[in-house]
Image: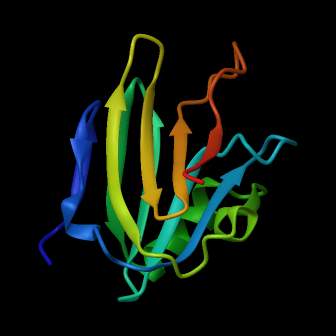
Amino acid sequence: MNELYRQDDKWDIPELSGEPCTSLFGLTYDKAENHPEILFLEFGSGEWHRCYLDAYLGFWDKTSLTDLNSIINDDYDGARKIDYLKKYGLNGQPVSRIWCDRNETYTYISIAFGAGVIKFRGFSDDSRDGDIDFISSH
């Protein structure tokens, strides 16, 4: 697979459709579990990816396990890890679609599974607006 990187307020990642997601966790300094600053995903192939939102843009980047550990230790020291696959009961389910979009209020990254969609919206310390939700398809 070629380098996979996105940085915009609207994008789609068809390259990962059908891939089983074996890990999906977020890091937060907030007490609530639904305010991650960044998400990390591992797919059945063993590839790691990360995504986050900043300045009304969605970012998606393939990363190595070595880089993942450095990012966590250097940039998110003291952050709490939240396992969203476990929280939403999605372990091992294939991803059907990953995309970023923007409406009049915020930019969001969506990760669709057969059971529903994880919607990750930008978090603002000022307004406390923004979070991660699971929208069930059942």
14 with respect to 20 (left or right)? left
In the figure, is residue 28 to the left or right of 54? right
Q: Relative to residue 56, is residue 133 drawn left or right?
A: right
Q: Quadrant of the C terminus?
A: bottom right
Residue at 20 percent across and 61 percent down: it is 14
Q: Name the residue at 42% across, 80% down.
A: 20
Residue found 54% across the figure and 51% down from its top: 137
Is residue 10 shown above or below 36? above
Among the 4 quarters of the image, the one containing residue 48: bottom left
Classify 60 as above or below 114. Answer: above
Q: Which image quarter holds the N terminus?
A: bottom left
> Can you give x and y, in whole percent of width and height, for residue 117 in the image?
51, 51
List x then y, in percent, for residue 125: 70, 22
Residue 6: % across, % down? 24, 48
The image position of residue 63, as x and y in percent, is: 37, 70
Picture quarter containing residue 35? top right
Q: Nearer the viewer, residue 133 or 66?
A: 133
Give the residue furthest to the left: 2
